[in-house]
Amino acid sequence: MSRYVLLARHGHHGEVGHVLSGRSAIALDAQGHAEAAALARHLAGQDVTRLCASPRTRTQQTAAAVAATHRIAVETIAALDEVDFGRFTGVSFEALADDPDWRRWNEARGEARCPGGETMAEAVARAVGFVSAAGDGVTVCVSHCDVIRGVVAHYLGLPLARIFSLGCDPGSVTTLRLEGKGAVLVSLNERPLLDRGDGLRRG
């Protein structure tokens, strides 16, 4: 039987693009809830075997929309958690732009450690460890942008410095078909269409 892992990013929240939320408790905003509903509709035709999510509020809310459609429980998986950004957490990107540690982190994603946090390699290793052990069928993993891009980079053999070339929008789905110890990238950054009833339109 085939093994598919669908890596879904949580929906939008008020800090996207402005603040490095990290492991904060921020919740989805109205757009994010609409994106979660769109994700649930998008996956309605899938025979989801397992539904997993990072411990963060925004991923749990996104997964809950899918769970309601599929009548399946959400499993909270620590390995899918956001990168531990340490002291960068909760800081605006504008403020981070002048931080030499932040510049080093972005220039050396493969080696640099967030002050008081983890390295990108550590975050990717835990996520890949979970993904690689997925069972038969379709496993949906609701996680975070850098974690998803890091998992994809791992399976494509890309250095972590290249993750910025991989799209991962809020509410998007990236699909992997696992084959032995590797994986085939089936789709990247697929963005479910919002319904008119959601009251929101994609820009």
Image (cartoon, rainbow, N blue to C red):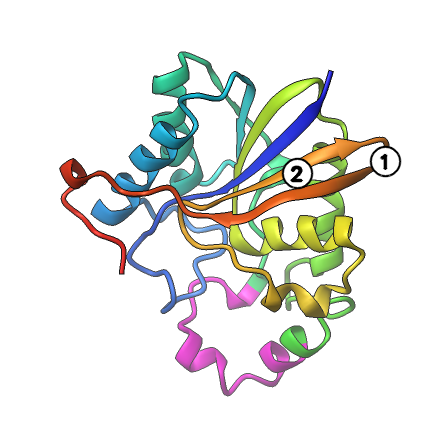
Quick check: 135 above or below 169? above
Cβ–Cβ below 8 Å for labels 2 and 1?
no
Residue 161 in the image, given as x and y percentages of width and height: 71, 70
> The N terminus is located in which quarter?
top right
Q: Which mark is residue 176?
A: 2
Residue span colored magenta: 87-104
Q: Which residue is mark 1?
A: 181
N-term mark: 2 or 1: 2
Quick check: 31 above or below 74? below
**Which residue shows up at 40% across the image and 12% down it?**
71
Residue 42 in the image, given as x and y percentages of width and height: 39, 32
Quick check: 85 above or below 71? below
SS class, disc 2: strand
Viewer-proximal residue, 65 or 42? 42
Q: What is the tally of numbered marks visible in this picture?
A: 2
**Which residue shows up at 68% across the image and 48% down it?**
151
